[in-house]
Amino acid sequence: MKKLMLLALAVLIGAVVLTAGCTSYSNPSPAPSSSPQVSTAGQNTVTMKGLAFNPSALTISKGANVTWTNDDSTTHTVTSDTGAFESGNLSPGNSFTRQFNDTGTFPYHCSIHTFMKGTITVQ
Ligand SMILES: [Cu+2]
């Protein structure tokens, strides 16, 4: 019976120490910003990985460049739905950069995997 009491005491002390440990770490740290969907920088990157564009929707400023990088194990293309741009075949490790000097929405896809879709919005 005494052993059980000691065990309960140990658990209780452990819980108190854990709680104290938690509270000491509760000072507010800046919340991690969500995935960078909007960028005003001159350079913006879209990666191709796992048969998907990431981010699939990217908003940039007028005049900014977008670089698509193929981080996948298969060849992809960056093909504008409206014919505004075409990367040609991008084998793994290759990239394609385009500058967007007009505002608007530019949907694109991979011509090899047509289910791969993305959109660049230029503001
Ligand atoms: Cu593809």
Image (tube, grey):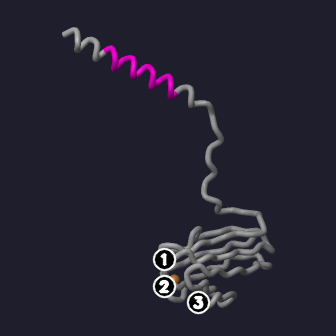
Q: CA distance from mark 2 to mark 3?
A: 12 Å
Q: Tell me which amino acid carries mark 2.
A: His
Residue 50, compared with residue 25, is above or below; it is: below
Which residues lie in the magenta part? 9-22
> Which image quadrant for residue 86?
bottom right
Closer-to-camera residue (44/123):
44
Query: Pointer 3: residues within 10 angstroms few (<14), some, or many (20+)?
Result: some
Q: Is residue 118 left or right of residue 18?
A: right
Which one is closest to the eye, mark 2 or mark 3? 3
Q: Secondary structure at mark 3?
A: loop
Query: Pointer 2: residues within 10 angstroms few (<14), some, or many (20+)?
Result: few
User: What residue does disc 3 label?
Assistant: 89
Q: Tell me which amino acid carries mark 1.
A: Leu
Q: Is residue 17 left or right of residue 58?
A: left
Q: Earlier in the sequence, mark 2 or mark 1?
A: 1
Q: Residue furthest top?
A: 2
User: What residue does disc 1 label?
Assistant: 51
> Which image quadrant for residue 59?
bottom right
Proximity of marks 2 and 3: CB atoms separated by less than 8 Å: no
Identified at 60% across, 81% down, the residue is 108
Question: On residue 113, which mark appears?
Answer: 2
Q: Tell me which amino acid carries mark 3.
A: Asn
Proximity of marks 2 and 1: CB atoms separated by less than 8 Å: yes
Identified at 63% across, 51% down, the residue is 33
Question: Which of the image's four quarters has the N terminus?
Answer: top left
Question: Is 18 contained in the magenta span?
Answer: yes
Residue 102, compared with residue 44, is above or below; it is: below
Identified at 59% across, 72% down, the residue is 47
Question: Which of the image's four quarters has the C terminus?
Answer: bottom right
Question: Is 78 contained in the magenta span?
Answer: no
